[in-house]
Image: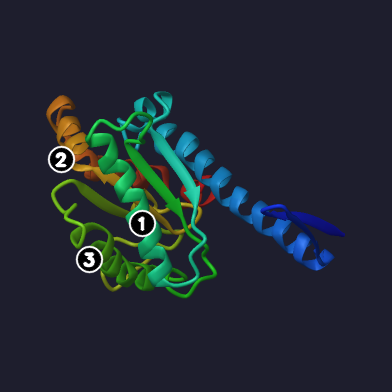
């Protein structure tokens, strides 16, 4: 197979090897699978189980941006997060069409997010380079989700259904704007109790329910 690339007035023919073309298609399917699985999780779990009372409105207004990360190392991931942070801040500055919140869905095969512990460590770099360094500390928050996330620092004890409140199909960086968080706090009763209520709800549903739904 060949593809044509235009370089000014000169036209060159470049051979495209079949395996490279196949690899590109597989990569696109991989990206798409991550995005679609995350959107289903938002619909069926975050909104469906009412874990976040604000998610439905954001999704209906098309203010939620979901995309797959292409990063192969922490440096590349920090650049991606920084770009998404700039988009969110742009919305605060009146940029039309800017999202209010972003879910950046990572490749779980990458070592920097393969485990919950490694992902937490990675988040320290993201916070410093993508949020603090450009001066967004008072404007944005980062929240993590992971298929193996746990509330316990040492991950000790029996499996806890409450851990599913911070689990998603793939390692995910959630960027939120502080202004939206504060607006939610003032407009919704007892927002401080939402995490505790969610934990209690999932514990009442049981581990088998959570493992099946997630």
Q: Please state which of residues 49 and 105 is positioned toward the viewer in this rendering.
A: 105
Q: Are marks 2 and 3 in contact (CB under 8 Å)?
A: no
Out of 59 and 133, give the one closest to the viewer.
133
Q: How far apart are the two marked residues, 3 and 1, measured between alpha carbons?
A: 11 Å
Label 2, secondary structure: give it.
helix
Residue 15 bears which disc, if any? none
Asked whether, in this view, residue 156 is left or right of residue 128, the answer is right
Q: Residue at x 47, y 70 (%)?
A: 114
- Percent position of residue 118, x then y: 37, 73
Q: CA distance from mark 2 to mark 3?
A: 26 Å
Q: Residue at x 49, y 36 (%)?
A: 44
Horizontal arrangement in the rendering, residue 11 relative to residue 48 (left or right): right
**Is disc 1 surrounded by few (<14), some (14 to 19) or many (20+) residues within 10 Å?**
many
Secondary structure beneath disc 3?
A: helix
- Is residue 22 toward the left or the right of residue 206 in the image? right
Q: Are marks 1 and 2 in contact (CB under 8 Å)?
A: no
The residue where tag 3 is placed is 128
The residue at which mark 2 appears reads as 192
User: What percent of the width, then of the height, locates residue 140?
Assistant: 22, 48
Instruction: Name the foreground residue: 161 vs 204.
Output: 161
- Which tag is nearer the camera, tag 2 or tag 3? 3
Q: Is residue 21 above or below residue 112?
A: above
Q: Quadrant of the N terminus?
A: bottom right
Query: Which residue matches tag 1?
Result: 81
């Amino acid at each position: 197979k060949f593809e044509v690339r235009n370089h000014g007035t000169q036209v060159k023919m470049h051979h495209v090897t079949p395996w490279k073309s196949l690899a590109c298609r597989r990569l696109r399917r991989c990206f798409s699978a991550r995005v679609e699985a995350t959107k289903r999780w938002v619909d069926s779990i975050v909104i469906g189980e009412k874990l976040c009372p604000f998610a439905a409105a954001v999704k209906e207004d098309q203010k939620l941006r979901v995309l797959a990360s292409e990063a192969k190392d922490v440096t590349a991931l920090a650049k991606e997060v920084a770009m998404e942070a700039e988009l969110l801040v742009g919305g605060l500055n009146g940029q039309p069409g800017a999202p209010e919140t972003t879910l950046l869905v990572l490749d779980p095969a990458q070592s920097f997010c393969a485990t919950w512990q490694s992902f937490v460590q990675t988040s320290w770099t993201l916070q410093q380079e993508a949020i603090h360094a450009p001066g967004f500390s008072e404007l944005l928050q980062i929240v993590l989700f992971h298929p193996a996330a746990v509330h316990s620092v040492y991950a000790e004890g029996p499996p806890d259904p409450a851990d599913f409140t911070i689990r998603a199909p793939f390692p995910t960086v959630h960027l939120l704007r502080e202004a939206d968080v504060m607006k939610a706090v003032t407009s919704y009763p007892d927002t401080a109790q939402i995490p505790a209520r969610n934990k209690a709800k999932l514990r009442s549903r049981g581990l088998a329910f959570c493992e099946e739904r997630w």
